[in-house]
Image: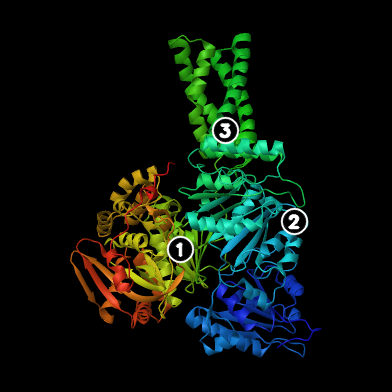
Amino acid sequence: MTPSPNQRLPRVLVLWETRLLTDAVAVAAKDMAEVIALARGEDGLEPLIRRVQPDAIVVDSHELVDALCALDGELSACSVLEVSFAEHRLRVVRGARGDDALLGAAFADRLRAALAGSMSTGTVASSPADAVNGGAPALRREIGVLQPDDGLPSSVNGHGLMTAESVRSVGPQPDLTIVVPTRNEAGNVAPLVARLDRILSEKTIEVIFADDSDDETPEAVREVAAASRNGVRLLHRPPEERQDGLGGAVLAAMRVARAPWVCVMDGDLQHPPELIPTMLAEAAAQDADLVVASRYSQVEEGGNALSPIRKLVSKATGGLARSMFPRRLRGVSDPMSGFFLVRRGAVPFDRLRPRGFKILLEIVVRSKGLRVAETGFDFGERYAGESKASVHEGLTYLKQLARLRVGALGFRLAGFTLVGASGLLVNMLAFWALAVEANMNYLLAAVIATQGSTIWNFALSERLVFRGVQKRRGYPARLGLFFLMNNTALLLRGPLLIVFVEAFGTGKLVGNLGSLLALTLIRFSIADTWIWAPARESRPHAYDIHGLMSVVSEARLPELETFRTERIPEQPTINVRIGRLNRRQSELVASLFRLVRHTRYDEGLGALGFGVDIAAADDTIEVVASPLLRHSPHVLYTNVVEPILRWMFVRAGYSLVHGACVEFGDRAYLVTAQTDTGKTTTILKSLENHGTGFLSDDLTLLRPDGRVLTYPKPLTISRHTVKAVRTPLLSVKERLLLFYQSRIHSKSGRQFAFLLTKFNLPVATINAIVQLLVPPPKYHVERLIPGVRKVRESQLAGLIVIERGHDERRELSFEEAQEIVMANCADSYGFPPYDSIEDFLQRMNGAVHLVDEERRIVGAALAGLPATLLGSSTMEWWRELPGIAGVDVAPEPVEADASLVAIPVAD
């Protein structure tokens, strides 16, 4: 349907929870309608519909359907369609009525066809006809929607009302994300975007404006977005979220960036966009993680539009930073630069604490093992607006340097000590006035003097030392606890003062000074960890696993870090909360509300022990975990979340199989073995010597049609594993800790833990405490194999089963291969409370047996594929992998170049 020039194009509003839905709607609406996609719930639904005036609304939430049906008066000529991926169906909840209806049965049929293709293949056809025929090339994308600003809702790429063609222009994952931090730069937006449109025409580029503006900059971004060749997105932060400066805005934008490489540049055109291709080429040539565009590069110092004074200040501050961090900033001539290219996977987002706008220094100092390259450039004139440099920013930079050098704890200790020193002077003056001038008893004088110095110290500590801390306790509580601490300390000072004055004859003043200094460290420890304890993070951690499953957790789950997302889904697959378990309440819920399917595992030790309460509510598995598990996140994930995910994936038609997956060319091979056989070392050796692509080491997502999706958990390693690879980026501290970690988290350690399960012991609690005290040695693959090629999705071409103790290579029958994969999956689980979780989810699933369904998925994926058993007495399976895959590579590894051997990174 092509509208006449005077007829507006119909609009489809997608209120999405699953990215696949937006893909399918974009295909179905091709040449028919505009598509407006929002990750939004029912809040503000009525005003939203009035603004957009949609002709069709597509949702995947039953609660939203109920809310929409209640707005019948606003939807007179609008159809409402509900999509259920779990039930594989599309339901026309409400058909459009009247002669004004623009989208009806034809659109529903096209959407049904697009969804049918996506549910069977996991991809979306590139056109409605392809969707019907089922043979279309896949349209792959990961659509990211930033929080919309006020006014008209954002489209798929964040701005304006976008047509289906604009939605398709977002397309696949971009090659590069360009982050432009802006504060009142409205006049620079259009010329900058115009210059960005003229570079890298062969690549897909995403531009994110990280905006802290109070002027018309957001409107300027929206205006240029519609005409830009690149996908333009806006991340506009309200004033209350800007305390960390433009560096914080850059960090927020990098978190939602979709490309593997991120270029950060100023929005004032002093950084030439034409240099970006050179930076990309330099990163490839030098195999670098970070390329800095330097104004003072020794290789090529470009022209500089800075005034002599600003140039002097810039070089001085940069030199100060290099003097404080000589090893980390080796090779970085311009740590103050705001123009750089970085590999997103090399940035430790959770470790960054930006202040002000100098984010590069923060990234370089806090990132371990970054490979850095430089290129010079001509620093140009500002096009419009005013510079952000100021005395305030200079002071912020000096504070940032101090925090980076001594750490936040050391910075607070120094401040607390200085405040204490000033309080010491107040105390001494008050003590002298009372004990010497007024001739008061020196013990009573010490008590009164302490109250005066306590008020002084508390006021300065509040104002200076703990000013930026989000405090857990209120002001009266902090004041009361501070007085309690100081007066309790006085009980210790009394005996010390007597010893100094009476026993050693030091005199009253010197004795008072000695007692105060002796208690300074103790007081700071109490103040920092108790009185001014930081507020617990209220924002939950969210993880989106390929758009198939979502997890929201109050405790961080490091194993899912690769899937972290900023958007908190309204109805996650798994919702993990931390709380105290109440057995009476739990049993009451289970007995009174049979519709709430429920299970519990509790070792009876309260907050100090392992306990989980699991219930199924609507389409979400609700988990309440005991407080101990907040501090032992590996146990929370491995023993609770992962078993739930395993069976939830089965319900969705996927199998989370126990096996590594690597790619030779464009063909993926599943490598499976019993636990502690040597699979991790095999995979790392293959990655290092054969250049294979990495999907997973421990678990792999498998579809019935043989498609495999990455599940890149951190690799659990040992000293033997580290010795097997040439250039692991581990610090001296991490290498030393491996000695103890490898012994505790070894095969014998796990066997001992399973042995304990046969006795009436709180083994889950013991396991949680052990992993709290000695965390398992887990590292992401890029820390072990720098520059590894990571693959998101591939087609399975075969199965390789490795066994130790004998030399053998033979083909496996289909039945043998299927049985081994299933047995290895079962071997990786079994520790409490796994049996309780499996039984609960099986009862929840009803007639369909989950183990049988998982077997069916695995069997369908392996059908017709070669399966090889590979035995080795030398544990060098990696040498045989290319031959099995039919790839011609040298059988011996290339000798390591001494220049490539990693030097341990100092902490």
Residue on which disc 3 sits: 482
Q: Is residue 467 above or below residue 229?
A: above
Vertical relation: 443 (above or below) 175: above
SS for callout 3: helix
Q: How packed is label 1: few (under 14 Cα within 10 Å), some, or many (20 or more)?
A: some
* Residue 105 quadrant: bottom right
Task: Give the image location of residue 645, x and y in percent.
Answer: 43, 68
Toward which corner of the image does residue 699 lie, by quadrant? bottom left
Horizontal and vertical percent for residue 286?
A: 48, 54
Instruction: Look at label 3 and name its amino acid.
Output: Phe
The residue at the point 71 percent across, 59 percent down is: 192
Residue under numbered circle 2? 188
Q: Earlier in the sequence, mark 1 or mark 2?
A: 2
Pointers 1 and 2 in contact (C-beta within 8 Å): no
Determine if residue 214 is in view.
yes
Q: CA distance from mark 1 to mark 2?
A: 59 Å
User: Marks 3 and 2, Cα distance to the nearest angstrom?
Assistant: 51 Å
Residues marked 3 and 2 touching at CB (< 8 Å): no
